[in-house]
Amino acid sequence: MKKLIIVGVSALTLGAAGGYFAGKSEEGKQATATTAPDAATRDSRKARTDTASPTTATAKDKKARSLDGILSMSGGVKARTQALMDYYSGMTADQLTAEADKLSHLPIEQKMMASLLLYGRWAEVDPQGALAQTNKMGFEGAMLRPTVLQGWASSDPQNAAKYFSANPREFVQMGGPGGNSASVIASEWAKLDPESAMTWAGTLTSGQDKSGALASIVREIAAKDPAKAVAAAAGLTGDDQTRADREIAGQWGATDFTAAKAWIDSLPAEARDQAMASALSSFASKDPVKASAEIASMTAGDSKNQAISQVAQAWASTDPAAAAAWVVQQGDNTDNAIRGVMTNWATQNSTAALAFIEQQQPGTFRDQAVASYVMANRSADPSTAVTLAETITDERDRDRTVGMSAMRWMQEDPVAAKEYVQGSTTLSDRAKEMILSGRGPWGGPGGFGRGR
């Protein structure tokens, strides 16, 4: 659970930190590397300005000059985030090092918000020092490392790339040698100089790093000029070309689906469906009804199933009943699609969503609809949710969903919930033991969650 919290906070704050500090460093000058002496001179002037008239400073200003003061501010997360950005923006590397030591006592949510903003600034004035610090921080450091790399690459991609190439083990993550690190550098570099970024990506020796970097560059170009991205990707081959086509289609589909479709139709037959699925995923957020009509022209397979799921989920945000009816019409292999629809529908109109479920025949499709409904509908009476979950035909899905409902019930009425669990003929003995012990449906090693 702790890791999940960290990931959530990181995802929410990462863009703000990188974008804010990158913008600060580029005001009134070209994006170049920031040297420590220059930063120290600027920071010294900033410090003198901030403290020149202490007698005229307001109480609010004084409060905003300390970490604890900022975190206790009223006004919501946005105000505290902005205050932290301003607080860290004028600091030197030494000051940031001292501030980093103050974060250990904070609750995990506050700690990660402040850490991402602090390290985003640190990446500008002393990126290697910031990276060295993250290497001492275990899992939290691994979460912060991409922030540092992004901040560095946003102003000095050449040296960030050199450091990455010279220290590949420092960026080892799940999924390959550099994880997404090469993509981070390439994406930032492409914002400044896509041609140089493309040249660098071509020198990478790891297939995964190279592929990720190329895709990121093409995506950045396509966001501004899809036709230019098509030209930039013309020299790619194999999987790199296929991935580039998907990136271009995704960006183009969001801005001009008609033009994107015309380009997709010009692609080799084997590449069209993957590109179309990507374009429709973007287009669906604007017009899911029109996007759904386009799916009819796709051939059966994984790409079409992916497109169905993406369109259905987008449609469900505005009209879940229509989305669900359309998913049913798509035939087999729509289990994933109904999950996204039901998650939306259960929170918007749980009565109508339940009526839809009751019309479905037993099987995988109904199982997934029930599981998604039960998980999403937190306003339902726990005993009712348990009863519905018991109708799932797949044993693992049933144990998992019933277990989640029973755990929720334990929080509201532990006596009734324990009585149900102990007398259940639906739950396995192992599931009963884990629920009653408070470990829940995942329960660490040996849990009974979905693991197929």
Image (cartoon, rainbow, N blue to C red):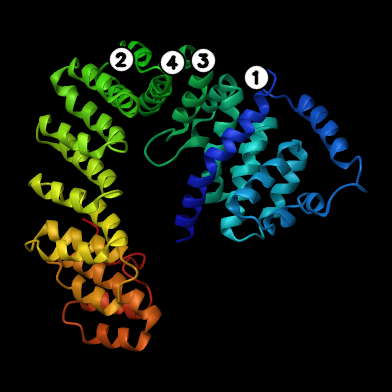
> Which amino acid, mark 2?
Leu
Mark number for residue 132?
none
Give how far apart the Cα atoms at labels 3 and 2 are: 19 Å
Residue 414 in the figure: left or right of residue 342 = right
| Residue 68: percent from left, percent from top | 72, 57
Of labels 3 and 4, the one closer to you: 3
| Residue 84: percent from left, percent from top | 68, 46
Q: Residue at x 25, y 50 (%)?
A: 319
Give the crowd class for mark 4: few <14, some 14-19, many >=20 residues within 10 Å: many
**CB within 8 Å, label 3 to label 4:** no
Give how far apart the Cα atoms at labels 3 and 1 are: 12 Å
Q: Nearer the viewer, residue 316 or 39?
A: 316
Give the crowd class for mark 1: few <14, some 14-19, many >=20 residues within 10 Å: some
The residue at which mark 4 appears reads as: 198
Of labels 3 and 2, earlier in sequence is 3
Of labels 2 and 1, the one closer to you: 1
- Secondary structure beneath dot 1 equals loop
Of labels 3 and 4, earlier in sequence is 3
The residue at which mark 2 appears reads as: 236
> Which amino acid, mark 3?
Asp
Give the crowd class for mark 2: few <14, some 14-19, many >=20 residues within 10 Å: some
The residue at which mark 3 appears reads as: 193
- Vertical arrangement, residue 280 with respect to residue 331, above or below: above
Can I make out residue 430 in this image?
A: no
